[in-house]
Amino acid sequence: MATARGPARLGAAVCALLALSLRPEPVRGQSEPKIHSTEEVILKPSNTEINLYCNLTLTSSPCNGSYWIKDGEEITGTRNVAANSTEYKILKPRTDNSGEYQCVFTFESSPPVNATIDVKARPEITGHKKSENKNEGQDALIYCKSIGYPYPTWTWHKKELNNDTGRYMITNKDNYTELIIKNLHIENDPGDYMCNATNFLGDSYASTLLRVRSHLAPLWPFLGVVAEIIILVVIIVVYEKRKRPDEVPDDDEPVSGPMKTNSTNNHKDKNLRQRNTN
């Protein structure tokens, strides 16, 4: 009995292997949709219009619509119903039209598919602080924003910028960068700070003037008012002192106008005597 079971098991194993080898393999990719789309686009000053298109060339399920996405957000007004092709036009393209575009096709019985088209442009800084005023000991925040794609590499520059103290903190995220300076020093921190955005198409930069005031800066308006009051009091006192001698005469000053003297009185007495003699 043992010898009979061995050949039977061997024959069953051979049959199973033959069945697996003869089974037809599924054609990979035959049921997966394929999209033919525009290649990447580089914006140039001479561009007057850009056309982005996508064609659904292979699908096993009927398409029930399509739409466009830019930088992860759907572009309003681009939904198209039951079409195997879609197009998106950019009229008078500018730097802020650059980014990552996607055409998305949806189906009734299968998940959506998409294709990505990169519209690239050199960076352009569109937002930054021209100047910043802070008091000594405070923290300062300077930032820069840019447009353009791919996202730039950010760097900050300042003459004699030394971060040995660890007071400078830089944060970069896509088209945004910020520089935070802790515990401002009036001797070292004032000056022009420059942010620079660079990608493979070019670069752009902008500068911010940082002013650092003394600890006494909040007292300056009060000290100015006190100084004005003191000057006004001094002027009034000097004016009163100069005015008093002219208006109130002293006893030692001579009386103005003719004064009767003893000689005049004697002359009158003499005339009176002569009349009496006559």
Image (cartoon, grey):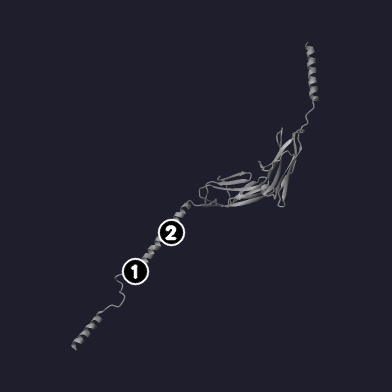
Q: Nearer the viewer, residue 166 or 45?
A: 45
Q: Quadrant of the C terminus?
A: bottom left
The answer to whether residue 117 is visible is yes
**Label 1 crowding class (10 Å Cα cut-off): few <14, some 14-19, many 20+?**
few
Q: Which mark is residue 215?
A: none
How much space separates mark 2 and mark 1, taking CA atoms? 29 Å
Residue 35 as seen in the image, left or right of residue 158? right
Judge by depth and name the residue closer to the eye, 141 or 84. Answer: 84
User: Residue 245: image x %, image y %?
Assistant: 34, 68
Name which residue type carries label 1. Glu
- Residue beneath disc 2: 228
Instruction: Report the side of 88 relative to 196 (left or right).
Output: right
Residue 40 at what x, y percent from top left? 72, 44
Q: Where residue 214 appears, x then y in whole percent?
A: 49, 52
Q: Relative to 240, is 75 above or below?
A: above
Q: Mark 1 = which residue?
A: 247
Residue 52 appears left or right of 168:
right
C-beta proximity under 8 Å, tags 2 and 1: no
Query: Element type at marker 1?
Result: helix
Q: Is residue 86 left or right of residue 147?
A: right
Residue 114 in view of the camera: no
Q: Secondary structure at mark 2?
A: helix
Asked whether 238 or 214 is in front, the reply is 238
- Neighbour tally class for label 2: few under 14, some 14-19, many 20 plus, Cα within 10 Å: few
